[in-house]
Image (cartoon, rainbow, N blue to C red):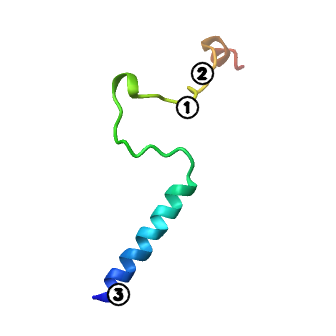
Amino acid sequence: MWKIALGFAVFAALAIYILSQGGDIDMGGEKHGGDATHTEEPAAVPPASAAHDVK
């Protein structure tokens, strides 16, 4: 039984250490509406004329 408690304590300490080193981590769950912010830039789409100019 003590091995389970020790394993849990080690795992919890490791998880807390990793989360503290991660920077800006939001543990608030899903965001909807005005709270949702998407920081990735959209992929660049080439103009349609460039795709048809290939010979």
Residue at position x 53%, y 56% from top? 20
In percent of width and height, residue 11 lies at 42, 72
Q: In the image, 20: left or right of 54?
A: left
Residue at position x 27%, y 88% from top? 1
Pointer 2 with pointer 3, Cβ within 8 A = no
Q: Quadrant of the C terminus?
A: top right
Kind of residue sitting beneath label 1 = Glu
Query: Which residue carries the number 1 mark?
Result: 40
33 up-or-down from 40: above or below? above
Pointer 3 with pointer 1, Cβ within 8 A = no
Tell me how far mark 2 sits from mark 3, CA to CA.
Answer: 55 Å
Kind of residue sitting beneath label 3 = Lys
Tell me how far mark 1 sits from mark 2, CA to CA.
Answer: 15 Å
Tell me how far mark 3 sits from mark 1, CA to CA.
Answer: 43 Å
Tell me which numbered mark, 2 or 3, is placed earlier along the sequence: 3
Badge 3 density bin: few <14, some 14–19, many ≥20, Cα 10 Å: few
Query: Which residue carries the number 2 mark?
Result: 45
38 up-or-down from 27: above or below? above
Badge 2 density bin: few <14, some 14–19, many ≥20, Cα 10 Å: few
Tell me which numbered mark, 3 or 1, is placed earlier along the sequence: 3
Q: Nearer the viewer, mark 1 or mark 2?
A: 1
Badge 1 density bin: few <14, some 14–19, many ≥20, Cα 10 Å: few
Query: Which residue carries the number 3 mark?
Result: 3
Viewer-side residue, 52 vs 3: 3
Residue at position x 36%, y 33% from top? 31
